[in-house]
Amino acid sequence: MKTLLLSLLLGLTLVAALALYAVHLWRRVWAQQRARNEAIRTRQQRLGGDIGILAGSLLDDQLPLIEGAIRIKVLLDNYDSALSNDARCQVFHQLYEATADVPTHAAWKALDRLDKRRFEKRFDELELQHKAAARTAARWLLDEGLRRTPANA
């Protein structure tokens, strides 16, 4: 009887210790989830703020239209894919795709003057063709689009 009682007591102690350890592990999981959610929220706020700055700069002509459209499109893709794919933002995708073959950074610097002028001529044509739509999209982002809760959050 004594060994049965001792075994029972030992078993209950072991179960209690395992239960406490399980609670400890779950608290760590919950803390990690909170930290991850906070990091996501902070990232989304940063991206939304960056998009707002770019949209405002595009409207104020402080940023070249093509560069602004490309940057906004890339940030929108990371911020909220549903917003990025909204019909009112398609101009950013069109300009991105129309300039996808343009060399960047060191490759741009390595281009000869004639090639640069050819690309710059295309930029001017794209700007004439899409400026009004890009400005309308930027205004919509500032007034409405960025005020929605991101689907990716």
Image (spheres, rainbow, N blue to C red):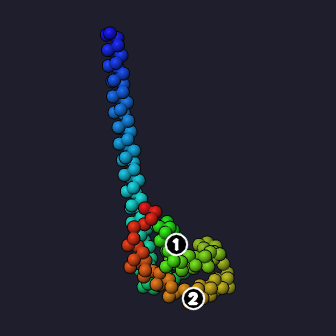
| Residue position for label 2 | 129
Please name whichever residue, 117 or 50, is drawn nearer the observer in this view of the structure: 50
On the image, which quarter does residue 108 sit in?
bottom right
Per the image, label 2 sits on a secondary structure element best described as helix
Circles 1 and 2: CB atoms closer than 8 Å = no
Amino acid type for the residue under numbered disc 1: Asn
Residue 24 point in image, percent of width and height: 35, 38
- Choose mark 1 or mark 2, whichever is in front: 1
Relative horizontal placement of residue 116, taking residue 1 as reference (left or right): right
Instruction: Let me know if residue 62 appears in the view.
Output: no
Q: Is residue 51 above or below residue 152?
A: below
Q: Is residue 118 above or below residue 51?
A: below
Residue 25 point in image, percent of width and height: 38, 39
Point out the image quarter for the C terminus.
bottom left
Instruction: Let me know if residue 60 appears in the view.
Output: yes
Q: CA distance from mark 1 to mark 2?
A: 20 Å
Check disc 1: other Cα within 10 Å, few if <14, some if 14-19, many if 20+: some
| Residue position for label 1 | 85
Label annotation for residue 144: none
Per the image, label 1 sits on a secondary structure element best described as loop
